[in-house]
Image: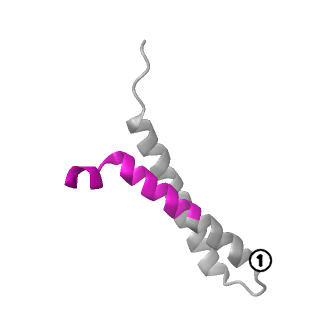
Amino acid sequence: MDQNLRSPHRLLIELRIEHADLDSLIDQATAQPGVDELMLRRLKKRRLALRDQIAALELQLQPPEPA
């Protein structure tokens, strides 16, 4: 069971959840007047980094296509 907690599939799910949470947080922040631009840039940068991690992990998990 311990190995299941550290599986790449589980990590992928956790990264997707965090990405979705950041999407929601960014949407809420942009809807408010007087938003902290520095905070917003940091959130967007983190979201972009998560997207890159997700894409890399998805590539690792996909079986190679036959030649």
Rendered view: 38 above or below 16: below
| Image position, residue 16 (x, y; %) | 51, 55
Residue 30 percent coordinates (x, y) = 73, 75
Q: How does the figure colour the protein chain or chains? A: one colour
Taking the magenta stretch, the answer to whether it contains residue 6 is yes
Q: Residue at x 38, y 53 (%)?
A: 11
Q: Residues within 10 Å of mark 1 (few under 14, many from 20)?
A: few
Residue located at (76% from left, 82% from top) = 32
Position of residue 38 measured from the top left corner of the image (x, y, whole percent):
62, 80
Residue at the spot 77% in from the left edge and 77% down from the top edge: 31
Q: Which residues are magenta?
A: 1-20
Q: Residue furthest left?
A: 2
Determine the secondary structure under disc 1: helix
Q: Is residue 6 left or right of residue 61?
A: left
Q: Is residue 46 left or right of residue 61?
A: right
Numbered disc total? 1
Q: Most prominent secondary structure in the magenta stretch?
A: helix
Residue 16 in magenta?
yes
Q: Is residue 29 left or right of residue 67?
A: right
State whether residue 4 is above or below residue 61: below
Circle 1 residue: 31
Which one is nearer the viewer's eye here, 3 or 31? 3
Residue type at mark 1: give it.
Ala
Instruction: Name the residue: 30% across, 48% down.
Output: 7
The quarter of the rendered structure image containing the C terminus is top left
Residue 33 lies in quadrant: bottom right
Q: Residue 55, position in %: x, y? A: 49, 45
